[in-house]
Image (cartoon, helix red, strand yellow):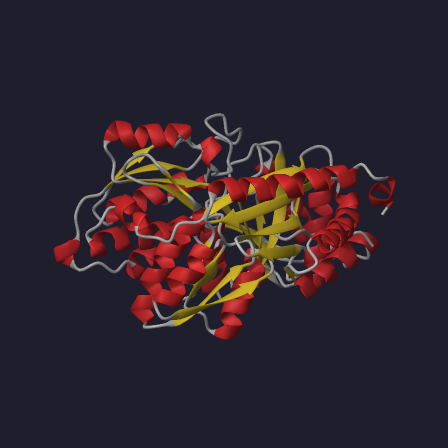
Amino acid sequence: MTRLFGTDGVRGIVGQDMTHEVALRLGLALGTHLGAGSTVAIGRDARLSGPMLSAAAVAGLLATGVNVVRLGVATTPAIQYYTSQNEEVDAAVIVTASHNPGQWNGLKFIAADGTEASREDEEHVEQLYASQKFRLASWKDVGRLSSDETCNDAYVKAVQKKFKVPDGKRRKLRVVVDPAGGPGTLVTPRFLRSIGCEPILLHGELDGTFAGRSPEPVEDNLAKLKERVKETKADLGVAHDGDADRAIFVDETGAFVPGDQSFALIAEHLVKRHKGGLVCTPVSTGSVVEEVVTRAGGKVVYTAVGSPIVGRRMRKDKAVFGGEENGGLIFPDHQYCRDALMSVARMVELILTSGKSLGALRSALPKFFVSKQKFECANEAKDGLARSLRDWTRAKYPKARIDETDGFKVYFEDGWVLARPSGTEPIYRVYAESKSEARSVALAKEFVDESKRLLRAPEVKAR
């Protein structure tokens, strides 16, 4: 059976592999999995296809006798927090494609505790989806539909309670907020005002087409944010992805702050507060995090890529902090999922309590250079490419240490390379790191070029 779920739900291009029929069947499968009488909350980001896919999923759930609470447009972490805080809610569905462009959409399932559904639950839903052996309710036992508009409000208030800055150190920071037209616009400016900051909105109207900028908060998409920070003489800039579970920062000079640097700064802040502790992160994260955490008296544990994997490891090992290098950070004292608003809260907290600007804070970090590349790779070719690229690497670099926690990571004396397939798109990613920028670029290029050569080989295409 073909795997339906990727690393973060089911995604596809609307009208092609993500249709109302897919959403309906997923609703029927989830409802059958949960059982009649269960309650499911459903929320969405601002994509144009959101209402259509939500309605289809709701129809499937109701048909199996499951009650549904509609939350409307909300951030992913707000929906997860709502789910974890309401005992009558057994699961949630979030209609989002996160950082993917507007033509994409998807559904992700959330467990009762607010974390992403387990792989075991996803597999059972996949089996039901494929077999279509759904348990349909009788006419009088179909599920009941209701709405609750308090989701974002409760979430913002919860983050406010976690914000910790002595009154004597509080001051009015000016923060440019770029939610890319996503639901971050409903929470981040409000939170900043509540703690005495001045938010300046960029792309601040809900826009399911993402006309202002692409929803992925990478440096190439944030030129306007960097300009606005400089124009307004702001203290900070923050960009969210399409569902606002990630936060990427720009410092007061308008300089882009890579995700592993903001991760390292907040990790150091929290490890010092806890006087040690464990930090969990995927193998894709830069070495700056481990150096800073170790220096602060903590320890780093590496996992496979994917925020659900990181969150579960954090819970198992009682970690004080964790997350991914793409701006998706997890705060276990709040919830075990990526949380952009809590990231904003902790970054503002760090700037205020330290009395230093973000630029000054990051200038003290160990210097590493990371080159991130990606290229198209059909899903059916990913396994073949992984095997061929691993074989080539072992033949060319027989003394290099290889870590196969996720994809494969090759360690050299002066850096490392990670090559792994995306779990959400038909692409392959190659990350390379070194203390020399030229070396990191050269390492990434070598492995990307070799990958593209191998993809042309008949044996790779056939696998």
User: Can you give x and y, in whole percent of width and height, for residue 94 in the image?
Assistant: 56, 49
Please state if 25 lies on the left or on the right of 116 as rendered: right
Q: Position of residue 415 (x, y in %)?
A: 53, 53
Residue drawn at x 23%, y 32% is: 233
Q: Is residue 88 visible?
A: no
Q: Is residue 84 visible?
A: yes
Expressed as whole percent of the image width and height from the top left, the position of residue 264 reads: 39, 56
Q: Which residue occupies the foreground of this view, 335 or 368?
A: 368
Residue at left offset 61%, top offset 39%: 445
Q: Which of the 4 quarters of the picture holds residue 53?
A: top right
Residue drawn at point x = 68 percent, y = 57 percent: 31
- Location of residue 283 (image quadrant): bottom right
**Residue 279, image x, y percentages:** 45, 66
Locate residue 134 relative to residue 337 in the image: left or right: right
Counting the numbered discs, the total is 0
Q: Residue at x 49, y 48 (%)?
A: 326
Please state if 432 lies on the left or on the right of 264 as rendered.
right
* Quarter assignment of residue 32: bottom right
